[in-house]
């Protein structure tokens, strides 16, 4: 989107202010369909940092995510927790991932997450 959707920005702001990761959302960004739960940026950063810290090969990158999350102004990104990229009838990765999507890159969205089947 050349101008971010104000309603989607409002939803992101509510997630940030409520510090909740219960809001399910599905977006289309760059042709990819991403579905999962939104998390506040600070929660998302903390979880990514923990995952990296536990990795023998990537632990040095953990510190990059421990910085202060954006506190002021309108949110510019969606932070997905337990999210999947949908491809056909499969969600990738199966266990869910941590995705950061620029709100201005979202071309379509809907409340809720799409289910998928491994069959």
Image: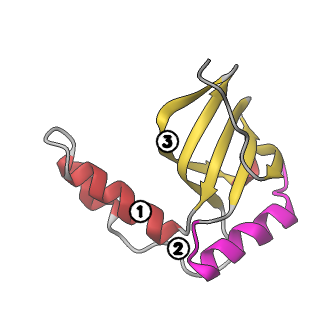
Mark 1 sits on what residue? 45
Could you say where residue 114 lies in the image, as x and y percent from the top left?
73, 40
Within-10-Å neighbours for mark 2: few <14, some 14–19, many 20+: few
Q: Is residue 83 above or below residue 119?
A: below
SS at badge 3: strand
Instruction: State the residue position of label 3.
Output: 96
Residue in the image at 80% along x and 61% along y = 8
Label 1 residue SS: helix
Marker disc for residue 70? 2
Q: Is residue 71 magenta?
A: no
Q: Is residue 4 visible?
A: yes
Q: Please provide the residue range marked out in magenta.
A: 1-21
Question: How many numbered discs?
Answer: 3
In this picture, is 60 found above or below 85? Answer: below
Along the viewing direction, whichever of 55 and 72 lies nearer the viewer? 55
Q: Position of residue 57 (x, y in %)?
A: 16, 38
Residue ID at (68%, 63%): 23
Question: In this orientation, which residue lies closer to the viewer: 35 or 76?
Answer: 35
Q: Quadrant of residue 71?
A: bottom right
């Amino acid at each position: 989107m050349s101008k971010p959707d104000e309603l989607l920005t409002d939803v992101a702001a509510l997630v940030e202010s409520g510090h909740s990761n219960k809001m399910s959302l599905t977006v289309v960004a760059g042709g990819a369909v991403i579905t999962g739960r939104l998390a506040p940026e600070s929660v998302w950063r903390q979880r990514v940092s923990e995952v990296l810290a536990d990795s023998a090969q990537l632990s040095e990158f953990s510190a990059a995510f421990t910085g202060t999350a954006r506190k002021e102004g309108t949110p510019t990104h969606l932070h997905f927790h337990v999210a999947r990229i949908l491809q056909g009838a499969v969600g990738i990765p199966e266990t869910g991932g941590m995705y950061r999507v620029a709100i201005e890159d979202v071309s379509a969205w809907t409340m809720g997450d799409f289910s998928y089947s491994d069959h």
